[in-house]
Image (cartoon, rainbow, N blue to C red):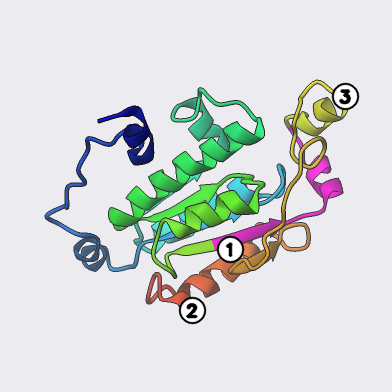
Amino acid sequence: MDDSTTQKLGKSSNTVWHQAIINRRDKEQRNGHKASIIWFTGLSGSGKSTLAHALEARLFELGCNSYVCDGDNIRHGLCGDLGFSPEDREENIRRIGEVAKLFIEAGVIALTAFISPYRSDRQRARALVTEGDFLEVYCRCSLGVCEERDVKGLYKRARAGEIKEFTGVSAPYEEPDAPEIIIDTDKHPVEDCVEQLLALLRHRGIAPGMAR
């Protein structure tokens, strides 16, 4: 095989996808709910992680199998080799998109909390799964409020030039064109935001019988 053929096939060309004996539908039936990807996106400090974990707590109470893939946690392991250049951000989201797809196959509701600033990267993650399996949640919050919430002092350091390519300050954030839901996290308490999300999940039939 010549180099050009290898490049077209990709670096892992000598691999074969193995079909599972127990498929996603079997797992969903046993779990009593559908699997899905709930993709939280927004500026740093917009409440993505807070809301994702609050929603997971409610889902747990309701007997659902779910897992939060948090941006900082992922960068401690799976994406620990990546920085914050546009190229590294793209690779970061590519990897988590593939991980979230595996959670779908496991019958789990995957909640991902990443800034994921580029529309093209979020669209690429959406395209990995069947239509209806990916729900984009835009945590909309003014930059001023995000900075007020910044307990880590990241915005202050970014404005001082200590952190390069910081989203919202020295790097862009591309708002979603057509998210499944917009949550104004600077206008509503966490509890109300969770209720908005649960209403969406009920409407989509992702977790039937979830009413309190």
Residue 117 appears at what percent x and percent y?
67, 46
Q: For label 1, count other residues whose C-alpha is less than 10 Å away and answer few (under 14), some (14-19) or many (20+).
A: many
Q: Is residue 142 magenta?
A: yes
The three-letter amino acid code for the residue at tag 3 is Ala
Decide if residue 165 is on the left or right side of residue 30: right
**SS category of the residue bearing label 2:** helix
Question: What separation in Å lies between label 1 and label 2 (alpha carbons)?
Answer: 14 Å
Closer to the chain start, of discs 1 and 2, is: 1
Q: Residue at x 81, y 28 (%)?
A: 158
Closer to the chain start, of discs 3 and 2, is: 3
Residue 144, can we see it? yes
The three-letter amino acid code for the residue at tag 1 is Val
Residue at the disc numbered 2: 203
Q: Residue at x 44, y 30 (%)?
A: 78
Residue at the disc numbered 3: 160
Q: Residue at x 74, y 39 (%)?
A: 167
Whether residue 99 is situated above or below residue 75 in the rendered picture = below
Where, quadrant-wise, is the N terminus in this rendering?
A: top left
* Residue that protrudes farthest toward the left in the picture: 21
Residue 194: mark in rendering: 1
The three-letter amino acid code for the residue at tag 2 is His
Residue 14 appears at what percent x and percent y?
22, 35
Residue 73 appears at what percent x and percent y?
51, 33
Based on the displayed image, in which of its 4 quarters is residue 109 positioned? bottom left
Stretch in magenta? 136-151
**3 vs 2, front mark:** 3
Q: Is residue 191 magenta?
A: no
Q: Residue at x 56, y 47 (%)?
A: 113
